[in-house]
Image (tube, grey):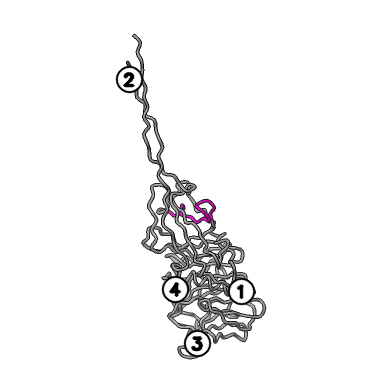
Amino acid sequence: MRKCVVIAAALLAQPAMASFNGWSHYRTITIDHTKVDSSSAAYTNFTVLVATQSVVYSTQTVGGELANGQDYAFFSDTCTTPLNWDVEKQNLDGSTTAYSWVQIPSLSSSTDTVIYNCWGNSSVISHIGYSTATYDANYGGVWHFSGAPLNSSDSTHNGFTWTTDASYTSTTGQIDGAINTAGTSEIHQTSGIHIPFTAPVTYSGWINLSAVGSDNFSLIFGDEGTHGLYIYQPSAGVYHYYFNTGSGIVDTTHSLSLNTTFMFDVVIDGLGNTIFYVNGSPATFAGVPAANIYYLMGSTVTSELPTGKIDEFRIYADVRSTGLIATEYANQSSPITFYSFGPENSAPVTSTSNALFFGSEM
């Protein structure tokens, strides 16, 4: 008798996770063009502050976005073309704000700009954002002063690091951390190295002073007491910028206040002018070019030591325009209104089929 073997097959559906070019999740970040100053049609290589604030990122079984943040990235499209970005603080569970600085190749003042925040990629094991490339050749130095213990290193390719002593501590700043001064010593460049910048140049940062020095001057930044930016108190309760250039320039247009955080910008245009900004508002005075920088928040003159804090100190080897400074202020003073986050998009679950064979003899 012959035996007949009957073989049957059944297909069993198995779930599988698709992806966005290898990334499991993304959300859009839409920059509101009405927050971008319209004096220019677009700003090239604009470095935008992205603060997640209460945004929570899904925990995934793939990747390490909640463990080390390496597969947390920014793209110009749906997770395909990466942008450059610098991570100031990484935290993706929503408990505290995460801060990243993302380079936008062209930021339009007439059309909303959309970038993509992607995460969850098990193949990404190191940062792919090129941190130092976030800041183009016009940046002379960027100091976030974030973290505890205090981080005073330069985020640009120049690598200028400030030296502090125990009297300087980390504190809450405008954007994550800041340097808190006690009015007892200065911050200075390592081994006496000066940061070499001459006009045209722009200096920028966030500052909050609680007291000026005993001689009614406090050096914010400068070189050996010869040139630099001071906060000057000509009379009780009155505070102005003072730029020491030999004869000195006093900015009487802006009235400054103690115990108030404000963004300062000082532009020296190389044409004999010094332009002072407070929170994006300018005032122009005749003046001379800048000097090299050695001291920050004080000098060896103890009567000029300030008490207070400084955050996000930057030097640009160019003239920052009024429109660009206004846009930076809009972004850094209120990130949550500068852009909006889209909803979380998860890669769809698809089905794959596995064949199950069985048979019988007849």
Q: Residue at x 63, y 83 (%)?
A: 286
Whole-percent x, y for residue 233 in the image: 50, 87
- Classify the position of the N terminus by image quarter: top left
Please tell me how crowded label 1 is: few (under 14), some (14-19), or many (20+) other residues with Cα within 10 Å. some
User: What is the span of residues highlighted in magenta in the rendered image?
Assistant: 68-82
Identify which amino acid the numbered label 3 is placed on: Gln
Query: From the viewer's perspective, is 235 left or right of 57?
Result: right
Whole-percent x, y for residue 26 in the image: 45, 54
Q: Are marks 4 and 3 in contact (CB under 8 Å)?
A: no
Q: Are marks 2 and 3 in contact (CB under 8 Å)?
A: no
Whole-percent x, y for residue 248 in the image: 60, 85
Q: Secondary structure at mark 4?
A: strand
Q: Nearer the viewer, mark 1 or mark 3?
A: 3
Q: Nearer the viewer, mark 4 or mark 3?
A: 3
Identify which amino acid the numbered label 1 is placed on: Asn
Circle nearer the N terminus (2, 3):
3
Which residue was labeled with disc 3? 233
Q: Is residue 78 magenta?
A: yes
Q: Residue at x 35, y 10 (%)?
A: 2
Which residue was labeled with disc 4? 180
Which residue was labeled with disc 2? 360
